[in-house]
Structures are given as C-alpha cells and as structure tokens.
Amino acid sequence: MLMNMKELLGVAKENGFAVPAFNTGSGMIANGLFEACEKMQSPVIIAIHPDELEFIRDGFVKFLLEEAHKASFPVVIHLDHGSTFDQVMRAITAGFTSVMIDASTKSFEENVALTKKVVEAAHAVNVSVEAELGTIGGTEEGGIASTDNIIYTQPDDVRRFVEATGVDTLAIAIGTAHGLYPKDMKPALRLDLLKEIRAITDIPLVLHGGSDNPDSEIATAVKTGVQKINISSDIKTAFYLKCREVLKDGSLREPLEIYPPCIEAMKQVMYDKIKLFDAADKVKCYT
C-alpha cells in the first residue's frame, strides 16, 4: 500500500500515534523492515539518505516500490535530508513518494526560498515535502552524537515558515541528535517547546535523531503531537553487532548463513520502536 507522507501522517495525527522512519541502505535492512511491519501491522516510512541512494542506486527503489505495492500495510518511500534541489528531483524521478529538503543550516530566508521551490515541484506530482527548522545535534566520528550545535526551533518561526512554504511536515529541533549519545551525555527533550510548537501548527511534526532517547520521553512526545520519528543508529547497531558475532565463524561465506540472524536481531529493535510509537496494529486506521 504505497502512499505519500501527507496522507500517511494525517491518519497518524488523527489517531494519536507516530510512524517509524527506518533508514534503509541495504536489501537486508529492507527485508527485515517489511517482515517486521507485516508482523506488527504497522505503517512505515522507508527513509533513504542521499549517500545511501548513491550506494544502493536508483534501481533499488524499483524493488522497494514493488514490495510496497504488495504490502498489507501503508508504505512511504522518503528521501531523508536532501540538501539540494537536484537531489530532490533525482528522488522524485526514481519514484520516491516523499522528499525532505533540509536547508536548516541556511538563513531563515534561504530555507524558505528553497523549501518553497521544492514544494512547488513536488506537489505537482503528488509527492509530499518535509522540511527542517532549527538544527539538531550532529554526529561525530564513529557515529557518536554531539549536541554542541543544536539550534532549538522557535515557535514564532514555525508559523511564518509553514505559511510561507506550504510544506506538508516539519522536522523540529527540541533536543535530539543524530547517532548514538556518548555514555556521559544524557539526552533530554524540550517537551515544553514541543507543546508550544504543536499549538501553533496543524501539520505533522517530525523528530530526527530518535535513537538513544529515553523511552518515556519519546512516548510523551508521541502523545504530545509528534507523528514521525527517525530511527537509524539503533537498528544498524543491532544488525552489525550480530553480524560481527556471526562472522567469528570464519567458515561462513553464504549470505543465507550470515544475514538471517542479523536481520532477526534488528527486527527486535524495530518491534520495540513500533510499540513505543504506538504504531502496532494501526493498519486498521487506513482502511
């Protein structure tokens, strides 16, 4: 069941849950994602970063589209953190049903101008658009999160930005960071700021950097008004930790011997996130 993000998250907003956006840069992750969401009867967003798209190539999107059409649950194929108009157009041409244009590090005026240009092009072909306002923490060497450069989203800017661009969904900065947090850093969400932003706009809100935050904070954010949460580091860590364990047996060389237990380990994380976001058994909301 292939959809765009505006359609998908509109239902999530009406019913008070969030949809997981799992970053998918390989066929193994994609297979696990489809299996996990089938079992949990959860809608899903397949998020692909431009770097991942370079690696897996446009032809991989055809496989995802075919699987999405066959799936018993809603699927969005989404460009994650596109930074240029060309990257967005490549994704639309390849068959993505949703794109993100991330101009959050530019000035407010430049962010508005580029987002508006993307919205005009994408909406013409029924592709939804996500933008970002404020900046979340980045990732240091080794995939470790850093919160040094968080610029919190300002509620007054949200009103102006949404009105000026016509964007469908908005990623906000309330204290998350990409990657996994160092052991001496305690992530904390500005739930008070989320409440202010939710009161200002009706469009679905997005959290990036959803790995490593306390479950209690994420659950509260969902109930407060977040409809999409991005998960990348958590699922990849589970997959590759198991992969390293399996490969200690130096005699293994067949993918069917190596990858199934890795996919199972990753799926356990996906199950936990789907439950945390209250997305389990929500396919019924789309019928």
Image (cartoon, rainbow, N blue to C red):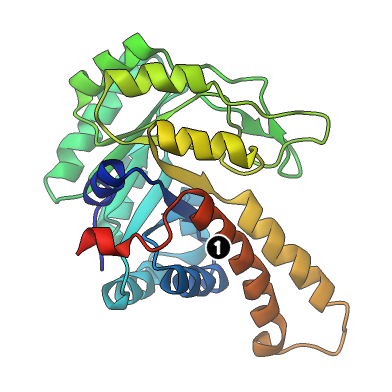
The residue at the point 11 percent across, 45 percent down is: 124
Q: Give how far across and how far down residue 30 sits, in percent.
A: 49, 69
In this rendering, is residue 246 above or below 274? Answer: below
Residue 49 seen by the camera: yes
Quadrant of the rendered image containing residue 14: top left
Residue tagged 1? 271
Quadrant of the rendered image containing residue 1: bottom left
In the image, farthest residue toward the left: 124
> Total marks drawn?
1
In this rendering, is residue 136 above or below 200? Answer: below
Q: Give how far across and how far down residue 267 sits, in percent.
A: 59, 68
Describe residue 249's horizontal placement relative to residue 51 as left or right.
Answer: right
In this rendering, is residue 274 above or below 112? Answer: below
The residue at the point 27 percent across, 52 percent down is: 8
The residue at the point 75 percent across, 88 percent down is: 253
In this rendering, is residue 107 above or below 74? Answer: above
Q: Give how far across and how far down residue 240 sits, in percent.
A: 72, 64
Q: Nearer the viewer, residue 137 or 58?
A: 137
Describe residue 280's horizontal placement relative to residue 157 as left or right.
Answer: right
Query: The residue tagged with tag 1: helix, strand or loop?
Result: helix
